[in-house]
Image (cartoon, rainbow, N blue to C red):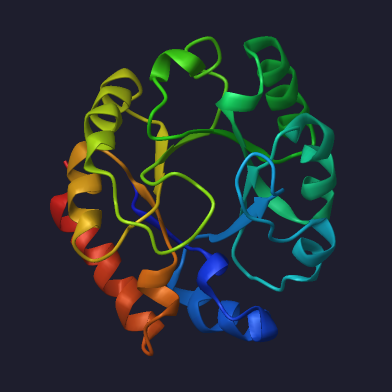
Amino acid sequence: MNVKIAPSILSADFGRINEEIKEVEDVSDMIHVDVMDGHFVPNITIGPVVVKALESKKPLDVHLMIKEPEKYAEVFVKAGAASITFHAEVVDSKAAKKMIKKIKALGCRAAVALNPDKSLELIKDYVNDVDMVLLMTVFPGFGGQKFIENVLPKIKELRRMKPMLDIEVDGGIDRETIKSAAKAGANVFVAGNAVFKEKNRVKVIKELRNNALAWQK
């Protein structure tokens, strides 16, 4: 599987966000955008107006950490998202299938996310319909949290089930934890603090990629 690095702008300087994106985009595969509503997670970030204002040569990987993603998915696609991820915890299978179909009809990739304490059983009815599964390696809401190693068996299980699926991990990814995640079977890596808290972001991203490639099965 191709290794993909997606710097998370949650850890970037929003006062100069497009400059921050420009600094990392040439060595990145996607730009990860966290959308939080203050209800599903205890934090509020950005909406579609800000997403529309983002300037990136690379696809915007928009992660909807919100309670009613079915109401807003289309708005974010139209704002420029290349990939929309919704959480399985907030929709039933019927609504999820309907939303996946709608997202794809709009020309966008569809993905589903699971929190660390949730089973793959939650997405079994539509895992074959999505382009990517995001397995959270922290509980979403704030950056800078510690990687939860208990998620690793779930990554391995999903990789066994879906050998060609993009499996994304988000939370506590750095030069060391990326090795464990890659070895378990993840191939898409979201990194926030590990990238934007460093002065040489390009160097860090290259190191993350090399470490993932070295440990990938």
Q: Position of residue 48 (x, y in %)?
A: 81, 56
The total of numbered circles placed on residues is 0
Residue 192 visible: yes
Q: Is residue 134 left or right of residue 187?
A: right
Q: Is residue 126 above or below residue 40?
A: above
Q: Is residue 156 above or below residue 92?
A: below
Q: Position of residue 80 (x, y in %)?
A: 76, 56
**Quadrant including the N terminus:** top left
Q: Quadrant of residue 18?
A: bottom right
Residue 216 visible: no
Q: Is residue 57 left or right of residue 159?
A: right
Of the pair 29 and 33, the residue shown nearer to us: 33
Q: Quadrant of residue 50?
A: bottom right
Q: Position of residue 61 (x, y in %)?
A: 59, 52
**At 39% across and 53% down in the image, what residue appears?**
171
**At 32% across and 18% down in the image, what residue appears?**
161
**At 18% across and 48% down in the image, what residue appears?**
180
Q: Quadrant of residue 121?
A: top left
Q: Position of residue 170 (x, y in %)?
A: 42, 50
Q: Is residue 35 above or below residue 116?
A: below
**Quadrant including the C terminus:** top left
